[in-house]
Structure formats: C-alpha cells, structure tokens
Image (tube, rainbow, N blue to C red):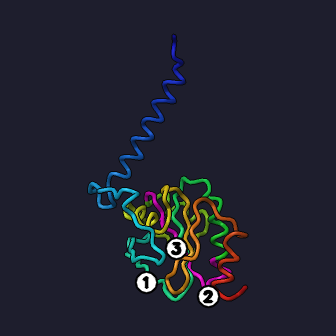
C-alpha cells in the first residue's frame, strides 16, 4: 500500500503544530519552564481574582485600576478567527459605554502580532500581554477547555456576571451591560 506524500505532509504538519503548542505552553513569559496546573485543580471563582500583566508598552497593569466600572475581560489571540470577528463590537461598545464599562483584552499571544492586531482594529481599550498564568486565570474564571475567545463580564463590585466561551455578538453582550450600568 502506497501512502500519498500529501498525507505524510499533512500528518507531519499536524505533529509539528501540536509540538509547537505544547512547547508554547511549557514556558512562562520569562522563558522559564512553567508548571501547568491540572484543570481539575483550578477552582472556579465567582469574584474577579487579583491579576497583573504588562500592557503593549511593557508597563504592568493591575486588576484594581479598572475598579468602579463594569469590566469586560476578554481572553483572545491575534490568530483566532472568532476573536477577529468580535473585536469591532468590543471597540464600538467601549466607545458607547466608556463612562461605565471598561473592556480589557488579555492576549494569549506574542507582542508583535498583538500590536499589529490592535492597530488594525483600532482597539480603544487596554490590551495586556498574557502568559501561561493568564490561561490559569481564564480557567479560574470558568474557561474549562482553555478555548479562545473567552469573555467574562464583572460587575463593579467584582462579582462575575457572565462567562462566555466563543465569539460574542452585540445582541448577547449589550443587554448585560445595560442591566449592570442601569441603562436598561
């Protein structure tokens, strides 16, 4: 039986892609080996835990600097098609609800494609550069399968009000924002 060279190329590409994914997750942002936390060991929380990640300029940003507003925390990557689709909606909603809502993007990605993405889409909210620790944060917030995008809406008091795996449409998100900002 003869195996097609296209089949071998496809299998080889899949193996290389899987190995790259595992290698990416094997190191933290400082290039040190990461110790992954088993999914079963991550306890889902109902309030936003403390976090800090650098922004696109390398400055550390902290969870509490966004306090007092409803926060839409979005875990995403530049290579993710649903992330690309939902970003214009987030930009428009950030503009419409700027007084009461703060969108925060946590990119699980490399800095340069994230910068290009933010420029291309005119992102008007803070974009933070996540790492392996950001994946653990997303799991604590309910992202059991570590998929992207993953969005959490947090009330001004820190309570998690919405967890959503996959792309979000305006019709799904805006009613929650209206309710939490008393515009509804």
Label 3 secondary element: strand
First to last magenta residue range? 94-110
Decide: few, some or many residues near mark 3? Use Cα within 10 Å; few <14, some 14-19, many ≥20. Answer: many
Can you name the residue that lies furthest to the left here?
Answer: 32
Q: Position of residue 178 (x, y in %)?
A: 69, 82
Residue at (49% x, 24% y) in the render: 8
Residue at (45% x, 58% y) in the render: 109
Say which residue label 2 marks.
Answer: 99
Q: Position of residue 92 (x, y in %)?
A: 67, 73
Image vertical order of residue 4 relative to residue 83, above or below: above
Labelled pair 2, 1 in contact (Cβ < 8 Å): no
Say which residue label 3 marks.
Answer: 104
Question: Is 136 on the left or on the right of 145, as rendered?
Answer: left
Can you name the residue that lies furthest to the top here?
Answer: 1
Q: Earlier in the sequence, mark 2 or mark 3?
A: 2
Label 2 secondary element: loop
Say which residue label 1 marks.
Answer: 64
């Amino acid at each position: 039986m003869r195996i097609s060279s296209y089949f071998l190329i496809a299998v080889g590409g899949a193996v290389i892609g899987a190995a790259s994914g595992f290698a990416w997750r094997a190191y933290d942002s400082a290039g040190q080996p990461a110790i992954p936390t088993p999914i079963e060991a991550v306890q889902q929380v109902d309030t936003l835990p403390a976090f800090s990640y650098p922004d696109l300029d390398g400055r550390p940003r902290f969870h509490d600097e966004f306090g007092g507003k409803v926060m839409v925390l979005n875990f995403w990557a530049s290579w993710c098609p649903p992330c690309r689709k939902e970003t214009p909606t987030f930009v428009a909603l950030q503009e419409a609800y700027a007084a009461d809502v703060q969108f925060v993007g946590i990119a699980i990605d490399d800095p340069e494609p994230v910068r290009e993405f933010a420029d291309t889409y005119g992102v008007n909210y803070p974009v933070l550069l996540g790492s392996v620790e950001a994946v653990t944060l997303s799991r604590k917030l309910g992202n059991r399968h570590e998929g992207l995008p993953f969005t959490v809406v947090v009330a001004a008091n820190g309570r998690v009000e919405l967890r959503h795996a996959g792309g979000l449409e305006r019709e799904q998100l805006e009613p929650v924002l209206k309710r939490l900002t008393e515009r509804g």
